[in-house]
Image (tube, helix red, strand yellow):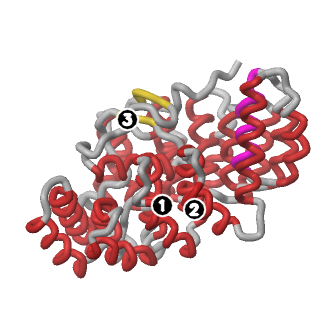
Amino acid sequence: MQMPRKISPRQLLLLLVIVAVGTGLLRPDRAEDLHTRLQQRLIEAELGRATAFYLAAGLRMAEPPSSAPLSQVLGELRSNVAQKRWAAADELAVRRNPAAVNFVIDAMMDPAGTVRVCLMATTLGYLRDPRALGPLTEAAFDPRNRDLRLCAIEALGMLGDPRAVPGLIEALKTRNMPVAAANSIARMGDERGVMPIIEVAADPDISLWMISALGELGSRKALPYLSSRMLDKDATLRAAAAEAQWKIGQVAVEDPVAELARTLAGDADVSHRQWAAFRLGERGDTAAIPSLLAALGDDAADVAERAAAALVRMGAPARIPVSQLARQGNTGQDYAVAILGYLGGAEDILLLERLAREQHQPLATDARRSVELIRRFTAAAAPRRTRVAGGNIAPNPTAQDSSD
């Protein structure tokens, strides 16, 4: 029986310990570091999650890359010290440098250790390079290493290449990490996965997760099946089917951005609003920027933080409107100030330094932290001739590290 993902393999992927799971648990208060919480939401979004999970202190993917030469980082992939290997994998995920892809593939195929090769698979998911498709598909069926199979299947979903879908369907049908396989298919929104997921949902041990995956996939082809599950004796399954139908109604429409924006602005259910913010960030449509800016003033921190993460993932088009909000001092200013740490440039430093001088805590602290991040991102980008930021922003694929 495959258990619910209360203990997620992502604790291996992120080198952090999951200490609680679920939407709305341990809601952070404003006294915590806003940038830390934003980094956590960026990690969740990168991994395709709309709900909260709470992490112990550790490495964060949204931090700027180090100034170490690429050759040094690549060499540490095979270090005898486990922590150095993990740090190197994390660093390469941040850099998104295509020159690292073959090195990471080689490290993943080295059977020296479970955690090592699992992390390499996840790093390939972050790199989003088509050269990783074949090796990850092969790793997804490795008969010796269960953790590697799980990480590789999840990484295929992060990769987002539709050519991965047949392999994911095969994993689903053979019960090879079926929950992870269904989630990866759903993240890509590929309708080829609808019927295979429905077929596997006949297994009562995993039917709940298959129903949820159908909602995330967002195809109307799943609606008749979901309607039939509304007659189920199990109240949990009926609720999951209803939620899946609702999600499909949000995205399988003529203008899903407008529909999601309406949900973000006015749905009474906090979980619906935070899911809408996450999905808008996944779509990356700049038409959602005004709605996401407005959501920075949401009374629920779970919603505002995911709207902030979505704006970071939008990249450069969001910088000017975010900067304007930071200047105006309206509701959501604190989040706008934090977002500028990831999207801002030298032109925003003067504003942030003024806020650091004139505003009281905690906004002044947020402003100083954003200035620090901008400078670190700028310094890290200079030798690579490209900007690397948190969230979903990848470096110029033609850029190479010139520090070697």
Q: Is residue 365 left or right of residue 165?
A: left
User: Is label 3 in a helix, a strand or a loop?
Assistant: strand
Mark 1 neighbour density, 10 Å: few (under 14) some (14–19) many (20 or more): many
In the displayed structure, would residue 188 be above or below residue 316? above
Q: Position of residue 94 (x, y in %)?
A: 38, 57
Q: Is disc 1 placed on a helix, strand or loop?
A: helix
Q: Secondary structure at mark 2?
A: helix
Query: Which amino acid type corresponds to the residue marked 3 in the rendered image?
Result: Leu
Does the image show residue 391? Answer: no
Give me the residue at 76% from left, 28% from top. Answer: 237
Seen in the picture, residue 231 relative to 28 is either above or below; the reply is: above
Q: Which residue is identified by label 2?
A: 280
Is residue 191 in view? yes
Residue 34 lies, in percent from the top left, at 29, 51
Q: Quadrant of the C terminus?
A: bottom left
**Residue ID at (66%, 51%):** 187
Could you tell me if the residues under marks 1 and 2 are in contact, i.e. CB atoms within 8 Å?
A: yes
